[in-house]
Image: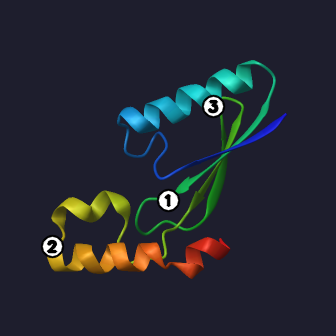
Amino acid sequence: MKVLVIASLFPPNGVGGAELVAERMAQGLAARGHDIVVVTLAPSGESTRIIKRDGIQVIFLPIANLYGILDAPSKHPAIKVCWHVADIYNAVMGRK
């Protein structure tokens, strides 16, 4: 079976609880013989890239927004509000 995993972040970027769960789930499914593709956000400044990691195809897409998801802690609260509004109605990312 072909399985698509969509995650905001995926190792090696932003390794936290949700990212580890997504990675382990993908690895477990791949170990059972499934064809796994992960679509995730690329770090700021990176273009689209595709890698193969542990038998899993990982597609990194650059975010079409004011800044990357990992850059949020350093941003002013007013800019964060604009980021969230753009994220809700982000047709560019929807097409990607």
Residue 17 horizontal/vertical position (percent):
37, 33
- Element carrying mark 3: helix
- Element carrying mark 1: loop
Residue most toward the right?
1
At 34% from the left and 72% from the top, the residue drawn is: 84
Residue occupied by mark 1: 42
Q: Residues within 10 Å of mark 2 (few under 14, many from 20)?
A: few
At 55% from the left and 68% from the top, the residue drawn is: 47
Q: What residue type is disc 1 on? A: Ala
Q: Disc 3 versus disc 1: distance between alpha carbons? A: 18 Å
Residue 5 horizontal/vertical position (percent):
64, 44
- Using the image, determine if residue 36 lies above or below residue 65: above
Q: Quadrant of the N terminus?
A: top right
Frontmost of labels 1 and 2 is: 2
Frontmost of labels 3 and 2 is: 2
Whether pointer 1 and pointer 2 mark residues with C-beta atoms closer than 8 Å, the reply is: no
Query: Which circle's residue, 3 or 2, is located before the other in the chain?
Result: 3
Q: Quadrant of residue 71?
A: bottom left
Instruction: Mark yes or no: residue 74 visible.
Output: yes
Query: Which circle's residue, 1 or 2, is located before the other in the chain?
Result: 1
Residue 38 horizontal/vertical position (percent):
64, 46
Residue occupied by mark 3: 26
- Using the image, determine if residue 43 lies above or below residue 1: below
Residue occupied by mark 2: 77
- Element carrying mark 2: helix
Q: What residue type is disc 3 on? A: Ala
- Apparent side of residue 24 relative to residue 52 in the rendered image (left or right): left
Q: Disc 3 versus disc 2: distance between alpha carbons? A: 34 Å
- Using the image, determine if residue 2 lies above or below residue 67: above
Residue most toward the top?
32
